[in-house]
């Protein structure tokens, strides 16, 4: 029998060195520890919203007392954080001043001319004016042309006067966005030098560093976002590093970025705007690793936690990256994993609207007070309460037994809030709540897949998060998906994904040249400069030149077109590289938009991405037990049944490698519960991934 590497007692001791992934969610803070041998331990602790780092400190205390870990043996700490996003959502960012070219200080407020809700009578600003109110914006006498020539030299008196006025307003950070600085950054660099001289404690964000690309509003906006979150994130990361040092953790802190790569905290705090999608990106990387382990590369990842459902698409083993995302309804132009997040999760609250219809979410009970069954003062009916009432959850084994659920409180909340007002039985009300939530999540999956030209029926659904495997078969039935992947540790896959992610940095430079006018030598020179910037970032990470690879790409569009497509550049193409780039652009345009024409094209930006090899993801679990893992029978209420059905309950850690489970059945483990509904069959892959396949075809297909 294999050695026991995943147990819930005190007897297990992890081998050093230890890598730790920490993902702070709305309900739970998830922790995964993996030692050099691949042994894995996991931990779920209720999040502490007022002080997120408190849950982190509690996690390391548990590692010492229950895992027998010497904190000095921790070699790597990787963190996924929502601090940057929360600062925007809660309007708790820094007090920011803006320096712009004279006459252009209102670019941030003017924004774009379109309105998303054209029939909304309550007009609200479509641009993020809250970042820098008008009285904190100043114009500076200077001007650079579109070709990078200095038209009006930077006026020192104007610059110093503007900075002095902002300092008098007690700003915490200053964003600098001069015209055409992405072509010639000299004036912005000088402004940063003067700010450092006049106000050393004020943080600075330069548009030439944050987003060196054309489109004035987008560039100014993302630079203001960067300045808005920079002091907040800097304090947070500094406090966490001090906390780790105080308890004896000497390992450097790394942070997940929106693109799906990690960066050292010391580097990330200088580019905080790249952390907006830190947490969800980790889940996608974990889903990518789970699919690769079983040889599947066309995936739809579905991360259902306590407060949200994050959905992403992976094609040919690569997560989709988008050049621009949305934060609180505002566009942010930074590369990020293409994740569609909706307010749907285990803690989603069910309610009845004015027309008497059943609604679920987007509001969530969170961790404090949590669902009614947590017995922490919550009295709203949530999806977790519904799953408990229907028998899907074991009240004594939730979160590995660290939190006991109270079925009576769950039933009382659903009865009073939903069942009685709608004239339904308790079970019908609970089933209705789940059905509404599943419909919402299925629509979210369609937005990610169908809208991007992918038929979800051709992909495997990767179900994870604390509630993902509970809803997987219902979602697959709704979408016609026939295969589901339940990773080895689905409840903490985002934390596990942190340990799988490579160290990565992406840099860009503007070009604005017609492709026909560009020479191979100029292309090589542009990428050489970007390679030098990548090398500097990797050196700051402590990674030597041979420890990473650099990939090149270019943003290409037709001449006169306003939107571009990122096209990989093959450096091995030699003198044919430009013609190859043009052909690849035509193919990509035809694939994305259904048409392409051999018209003149131009390059908008050059990009370089430096990336280390992904970290090993071959973590091991517990010993393989005997007896097939079946441990009990339990009555549950299925969506298609009128009465309770007795189904077998399996312990996942005790399943045999060749085990096959035909639904209906339930598979329990410390971090989640998997519901296998009728018509589905489960089996274990060699790496102990649970694969679900539909064995009964619906008559509607």
Image (cartoon, rainbow, N blue to C red):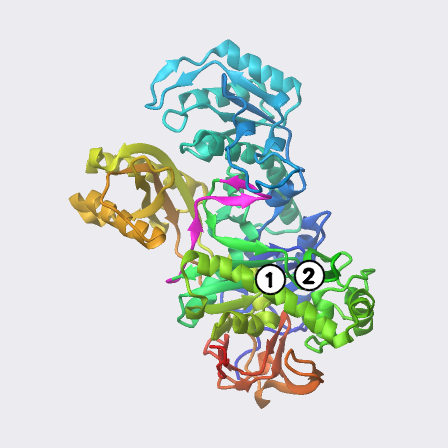
Q: How many marks?
A: 2
Q: Quadrant of residue 561?
A: top left
Q: Which mark is residue 360?
A: 2
Residue 210 image position (x, y, % from top left): 47, 34
Residue 356 image position (x, y, % from top left): 75, 62
Residue 255 higher or lower than 409, as above or below: above
Considering depth in this image, is 185 or 387 the residue closer to the camera?
A: 387
Q: Is residue 7 magenta?
A: no
The stretch of residues the image draws in magenta is 316-332
Residue 311 higher or lower than 512, as above or below: below
Answer with mark 1 or mark 2, whichever residue precedes in sequence.
Answer: 2
Considering depth in this image, is 27 or 445 the residue closer to the camera?
A: 445
Q: Is residue 61 visible?
A: no
Residue in the image at 78% along x and 58% along y: 369
Residue 200 image position (x, y, % from top left): 58, 23
Residue in the image at 50% along x and 33% along y: 112
Residue in the image at 48% along x and 86% along y: 658
Q: CA distance from mark 1 to mark 2?
A: 9 Å
Q: Which residue is mark 1?
A: 440
Q: Is residue 364 visible?
A: yes
């Amino acid at each position: 029998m294999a050695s026991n590497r995943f147990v819930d007692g005190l007897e297990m001791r992890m081998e050093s060195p230890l890598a730790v992934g920490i993902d702070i969610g709305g309900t739970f803070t998830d922790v995964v520890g993996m030692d050099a041998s691949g042994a894995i331990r996991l931990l779920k602790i209720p999040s502490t919203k007022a002080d997120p780092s408190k849950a982190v400190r509690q996690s390391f205390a548990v590692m010492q007392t229950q895992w027998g870990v010497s904190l000095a043996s921790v070699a790597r700490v990787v963190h996924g954080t929502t601090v940057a996003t929360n600062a925007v959502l809660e309007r708790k960012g820094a007090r920011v001043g803006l320096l712009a070219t004279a006459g252009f200080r209102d670019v941030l407020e003017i924004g774009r001319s379109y309105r998303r809700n054209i029939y909304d009578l309550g007009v609200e600003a479509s641009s993020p004016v809250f970042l820098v109110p008008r009285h904190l914006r100043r114009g500076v006498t200077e001007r650079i042309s579109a070709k990078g020539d200095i038209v009006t030299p930077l006026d020192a008196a104007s610059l110093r006067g503007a900075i002095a006025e902002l300092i008098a307003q007690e700003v915490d950070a200053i964003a600098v966005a001069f015209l055409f600085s992405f072509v010639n950054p000299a004036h912005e660099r000088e402004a940063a030098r003067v700010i450092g001289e006049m106000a050393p404690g004020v943080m600075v964000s330069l548009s030439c560093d944050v987003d060196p690309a054309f489109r004035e509003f987008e560039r100014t906006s993302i630079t203001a976002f960067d300045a808005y979150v920079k002091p907040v994130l800097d304090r947070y990361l500094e406090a966490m590093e001090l906390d780790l040092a105080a308890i004896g953790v000497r390992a450097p802190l790394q942070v997940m970025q929106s693109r799906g790569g990690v960066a050292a905290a010391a580097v990330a705090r200088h580019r905080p705007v790249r952390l907006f999608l830190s947490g969800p990106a980790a889940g996608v990387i974990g889903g990518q690793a789970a699919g690769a382990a079983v040889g599947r590369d066309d995936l739809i990842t579905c991360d259902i936690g306590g407060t949200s459902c994050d959905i992403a698409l992976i094609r040919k083993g690569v997560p989709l990256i988008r050049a621009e995302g949305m934060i609180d309804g505002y566009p942010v132009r930074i590369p990020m994993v293409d994740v569609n997040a909706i307010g749907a999760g285990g803690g989603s609250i069910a309610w009845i609207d004015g027309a008497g219809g059943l609604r679920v979410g987007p509001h969530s009970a969170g961790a404090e007070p949590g669902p009614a069954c947590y017995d922490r003062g919550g009295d709203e009916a949530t999806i977790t309460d519904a799953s408990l009432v229907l028998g899907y959850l074991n009240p004594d084994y939730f979160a590995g037994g660290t939190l006991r659920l109270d079925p009576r409180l769950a039933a009382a909340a659903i009865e009073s809030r939903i069942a009685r007002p709608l004239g339904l039985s308790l079970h019908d009300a609970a089933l209705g709540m789940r059905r509404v939530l599943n419909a919402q999540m299925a629509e979210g999956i369609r937005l990610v897949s169908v809208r991007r030209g992918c038929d979800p029926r051709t992909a495997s659904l990767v179900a994870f998060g604390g509630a993902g495997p509970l809803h997987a078969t219902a979602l697959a039935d709704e979408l016609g998906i026939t295969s589901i992947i339940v990773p080895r540790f689905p409840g903490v896959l985002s934390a596990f994904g942190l340990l799988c992610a490579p160290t990565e940095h992406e840099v860009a430079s503007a070009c604005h040249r017609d492709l026909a006018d560009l020479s191979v030598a100029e292309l090589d020179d542009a990428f050489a400069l970007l390679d030098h910037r990548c090398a500097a970032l990797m050196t700051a990470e402590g990674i030597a030149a041979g420890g990473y690879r650099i990939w090149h790409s270019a943003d290409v569009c037709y001449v006169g077109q306003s939107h571009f497509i990122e096209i990989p550049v093959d450096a091995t193409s030699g003198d044919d590289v430009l013609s190859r780039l043009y052909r690849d652009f035509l193919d990509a345009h035809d694939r994305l938009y259904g048409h392409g024409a051999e018209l003149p094209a131009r390059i908008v930006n050059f990009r370089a991405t430096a990336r280390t090899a992904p970290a090993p993801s071959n973590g091991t679990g517990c010993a393989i037990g005997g007896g097939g893992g079946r441990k009990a029978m339990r009555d549950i209420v299925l969506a298609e049944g009128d009465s309770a059905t007795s189904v077998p309950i399996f312990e996942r850690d005790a399943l045999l490698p060749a085990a096959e489970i035909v639904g209906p059945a339930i598979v329990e483990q410390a971090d989640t519960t998997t519901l296998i509904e009728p018509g589905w069959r489960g089996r274990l892959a060699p790496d102990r991934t649970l694969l679900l396949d539909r064995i009964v075809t619906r008559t509607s297909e």
